[in-house]
Image (cartoon, helix red, strand yellow):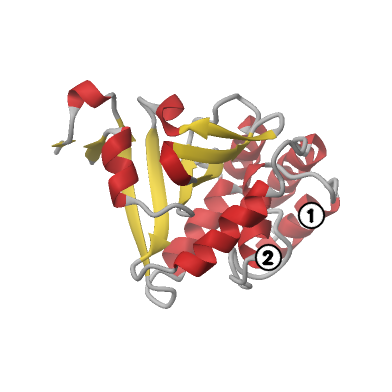
Amino acid sequence: MIELTVRKAVEMLPPGAFLLTHNPASALTDGITGGESLSTGALSTWGHGMTLDHGGMVNSQESRRVRLPLENWEGSILRAWFHCKPKPNLYGRILTALELRLNTRYDWLGIVGQLAGGLVGWLPWVGDSLRGWVSSEIDVPWTNYCTEGECEARRKAGWADFGGNGPCQKSPEDLDNWCIKVMDSEELEEITFKLVPESQGLETSA
């Protein structure tokens, strides 16, 4: 896995890139991780989704949607998804959509929905469609949790099928799996890296 400083990550990644991490700036998305783990029977890799903004900032849904320095995630493992060929118009619209959501409150009820969907999905005869239906029904429409807001912003920006079928009540793991599935057809690139302090520089480990 490569190690990137904030400066290097900002050089490599376009503003508007979708970022996944297991560590939100606060512990709000543990319910998503827990629901996904219950559903799959394995520990969920990703617990939070956000978007790289300009100037080394990220747009992230905490208790309210805010812009925070990327360096807040130093020491964390992140995964970035973005198009191989630059799409500045699309990414500009994504950032605008997220900018309009700044200061909106966190969808606490949506996290309950994710946990409920995870519990339902744990039953052997229940498929993903029913799990998704439960998650989407327990939700406050005018607020978002992290990846719900990321999905809605991209669909509003013109990436109509982002996240796959159904509503945007997706977990970080759902969106990562969708990106993997459509990586070739959507011409997506993926970089997984550890964000390190500037003093450590860029290294590659085995």
The 10 Å Cα crowd at callout 2, few under 14, some 14 to 19, many 20 or more, is some
Q: Quadrant of the C terminus?
A: top left
Q: Which residue is mark 2?
A: 156
Evaluate if marks 2 and 1 touch, with contact meaning CB atoms under 8 Å apart: no
Q: Which mark is residue 166?
A: none
Q: Quadrant of residue 201?
A: top left
Sooner in the amino-acid sequence: mark 2 or mark 1: 1
Three-letter amino acid code of the residue under disc 1: Ser
Foreground of the two, 50 or 58:
58
89 to 24, vertically: above or below: below
Please identify the quarter of the rendering in which residue 111 is found.
Answer: top right
95, above or below 86, in the image: above
Q: CA distance from mark 2 to mark 1?
A: 18 Å
Q: Nearer the viewer, mark 2 or mark 1?
A: 2
Residue sitting at x 44%, y 69%: 87
- Determine the secondary structure under disc 1: helix
- Is residue 122 shown to the viewer in this render? no
Using the image, tell me which numbered label, if any, was put on residue 136. Answer: 1
The reply to whether residue 57 is in sight is: yes
Looking at the picture, how far across and down is residue 42, in whole percent? Answer: 50, 41
Q: Is residue 201 above or below residue 175?
A: above
Q: Secondary structure at mark 2?
A: helix
Where residue 25 sits, quadrant-wise, is top right
User: Which of 66 and 121 lies nearest the eye of the viewer?
Assistant: 66
Q: Quadrant of the N terminus?
A: top left
Q: Name the residue at 35% across, 25% down.
A: 75
* Residue 29 x %, y %: 63, 33
Crowd band around label 1 with a 10 angstrom C-alpha radius: few (<14), some (14–19), many (20+): many
**Mark 2 residue type:** Lys
The answer to whether residue 175 is left or right of residue 97 is left
Q: Residue at x 62, y 66 (%)?
A: 157
